[in-house]
Image (cartoon, rainbow, N blue to C red):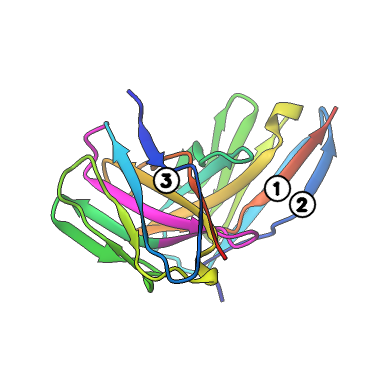
Amino acid sequence: QKEVEQDPGPLSVPEGAIVSLNCTYSNSAFQYFMWYRQYSRKGPELLMYTYSSGNKEDGRFTAQVDKSSKYISLFIRDSQPSDSATYLCATVLGDMRFGAGTRLTVKP
Amino acid sequence: NAGVTQTPKFRILKIGQSMTLQCTQDMNHNYMYWYRQDPGMGLKLIYYSVGAGITDKGEVPNGYNVSRSTTEDFPLRLELAAPSQTSVYFCASSDRNYNEQFFGPGTRLTVL
């Protein structure tokens, strides 16, 4: 079992849709959770960072962590074509563990 | 600040050739990392360093070597290139191991 599991998609939605991206993890010792966004042919960049269970909101983006079920989510409201990218979940235990990434396309 | 820079952007190697991928950061970060990214596989850690003179293996170190003589530079060496090393290589840095990692633009390597 991989430490961090993420559905690679691809996921295609119309502009304005609510997007839900999800990951599960296996080790309850993980404490820090991140979402990175990676545009095509670019390096990943940090989008959201959360430490505890619950929700963290930043504009149209909401990161959610449920430690009891080892589940992390990223919600994008009012999705835009500029949100088209690959989204990677990540967590840290010693070194950072990344999910495989979900490729999202938002169609105008 | 330039952040994390990587050279070259692209490279084609023949089997058995060697090369060094360069990585430099100007944020005075102690932690530096090398990842490879294959389609559908996410980022795999090759090597990392917690400071000048200190390096350690990650998940997939075979076929690679690193050195860290300065805080700024963290080169990755491929000694005998193999087709399995065809990938996109990313260098990253952070000020602490649980903090945000800043990534370079990547090096696309093809081994034929």
From the viewer's perspective, tell me whether residue A70 is left or right of residue A27.
right
Locate residue B16: give its quadrant: bottom left
| Percent of width and height locating residue B79 | 35, 68
**Label 3 crowding class (10 Å Cα cut-off): few <14, some 14-19, many 20+?**
few
Reply yes or no: does residue B35 show up in magenta.
yes
User: Which residue lies under the disc numbered 2?
Assistant: A10
Task: Give the residue at mark 1.
Answer: A103
Q: Amino acid at mark 3?
A: Tyr
Q: Earlier in the sequence, mark 1 or mark 2?
A: 2
Residue at the (22%, 60%) spot, across then down: B55
Give, as a three-letter code, the residue at label 2.
Pro
Q: Does the CB distance between marks 1 and 2 fall below 8 Å? A: yes
Element type at mark 2 = loop
Residue A51 disc label: 3
Residue B3 percent location from the top left of the image: 35, 31
Q: Answer yes or no: are tags 2 and 3 on the same subunit.
A: yes
Residue A30 included in the magenta stretch of the image: no
